[in-house]
Image (tube, rainbow, N blue to C red):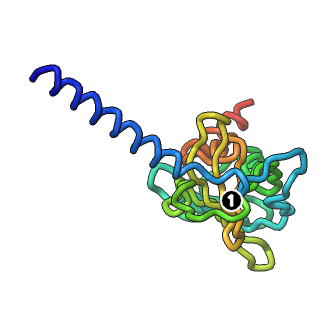
Amino acid sequence: MKKQKRQLIIIICILVLCVGGYLGAKNIPKEEDIEVGTENHTVTSINQDEVTEISYLYEGEIIEIIKEEDVFKYKADKSLALDQSVISNMLSYVCSIDTDTVIENPESLAEYGLTNPKNTICLTLADGRVVQLLIGDYLDITGEYYILLAGDAKVYTVSSYIPASFEKSVDDLIEAAKKTAEE
């Protein structure tokens, strides 16, 4: 009797593993939908000088930075001195994004963490246009993130340095300005 119970438990475990494997494989994007190659695809191509506002999420807080007289300032307190070179560096990462991995027809944005994005980076341009980048899930295998350019039907993968460049609080931007002034 014990031998039969043990065999039944083993069979149930194997069945659970098979069902789990099936469901896991079902959520992997179809190979024909992912285009990886030597051809670069341009995600964004923006002149940094045209950016008049930046907003992004940092630890649950929306950071808003505006440009006045060619100087970026914290919207909530314009008297704070922000490090302009750090902000320029942040912009350099998002104003010109190229990638070689494109998912042409994603079935569900949830598969890529884009229905509830980790971050949303918004750039307002001088002509009033808003460019919005949604940062999705991190890919352990490649060290990249899924991103979606609002209004585009394609999902892209980009290097982790792009979202990492926006992991800055207002205090980080102020501290960087203080360090630059001391040097």
User: Residue, x 80% and y 57% (percent of image)?
Assistant: 95
Q: Is residue 80 left or right of residue 123?
A: left
- Give the farthest residue toward the right: 39
> How many discs mark residues in the rendered view?
1
**Residue lying farthest left?**
1
Whether residue 127 appears in this view of the structure is yes
**Where in the figure is residue 8, as x and y percent of width and height?**
22, 31
Q: Which residue is mark 1?
A: 155
Residue lying farthest to the top in this orientation: 3
Which of the pair 62/171 is nearer the observer? 62
The residue depicted at 47 percent of the width and 46 percent of the height is 22
Residue at x-position 41% and y-position 39%? 18
Q: Quadrant of the N terminus?
A: top left
| Residue 82, horizontal then vertical, whole percent | 66, 50
Q: Is residue 100 left or right of residue 157?
A: right
Q: Quadrant of the C terminus?
A: top right
- Camera-side residue of 87 and 137: 137
Quarter holding residue 127: bottom right
Q: Residue at x 70, y 69 (%)?
A: 153
In percent of width and height, residue 144 lies at 67, 41
Q: Residues within 10 Å of mark 1 (few under 14, many from 20)?
A: many
Q: Is residue 170 visible?
A: no
**Residue type beneath disc 1:** Val
Q: Nearer the viewer, residue 122 or 75?
A: 122
| Residue 57, x across and y down, in percent | 53, 56
Label 1: element kind: strand
